[in-house]
Image (spheres, rainbow, N blue to C red):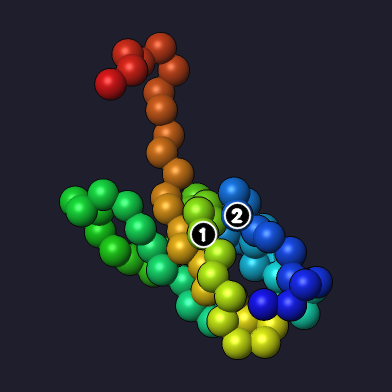
Amino acid sequence: MSKDMPSVVGFRLDRARQMLAEAGGQIAQITPTGPPSATQQVPDGRWRVVQQRPKEEAEVGLVVAQEIQLKANSPSP
């Protein structure tokens, strides 16, 4: 991965895509992760980058997880 490639860990996937494109980078692979019961679908909506892996020059692989929305005033598990 190039030194000029920004770290996008922690950002939402849409913002990460934008940041990498602005830096001249490309996403080679997006891998969703989560609990075994979660459906492994094409990431869209509220996904956050949890890992960034260098690939070929100016390419990265991203591991993403879906955000969890907690309801207000709900007891913690």
**Residue at image coords 59%, 49%:** 10
For the point 65% across and 58% down, which residue is it?
Answer: 8
Say which quadrant the C terminus sits in: top left
Residue 66 x/y as whole percent? 42, 50
23 and 4: which is toward the camera: 4
User: Residue at the spot x=33%, y=66% of the render?
Assistant: 41
The answer to whether one can see residue 37 in this image is yes
Left or right: where 1 falls relative to 3: left
Residue at the extreme bottom:
56
**Mark 2 and mark 1: Cα distance apart in space:** 6 Å
Element at label 2:
loop
On the question of residue 45 being in view, the answer is no
The secondary element bearing badge 1 is classed as strand
User: How many circles with numbers are drawn on the protein?
Assistant: 2
Relative vertical location of residue 48 with respect to residue 57 in this rendering, above or below:
above
> Which of the numbered marks, if any, corresponds to residue 59?
none
Which tag, 2 or 1, sits closer to the chain's start?
A: 2
The type of residue carrying mark 2 is Val
Q: Place residue 26 in its image quadrant.
A: bottom right
Residue type, mark 1 in image: Gln
Residue 9, numbered label = 2
**Image position, residue 54 (x, y; %):** 58, 75
In this view, the residue in front, 20 or 60, is 60
Expressed as whole percent of the image width and height from the top left, the position of residue 44 reads 47, 61
Q: State left or right for residue 25 relative to residue 12.
A: right
Quarter of the image that includes the N terminus: bottom right
Tags 2 and 1 in contact by the CB under 8 Å rule? yes
Residue carrying label 1: 51
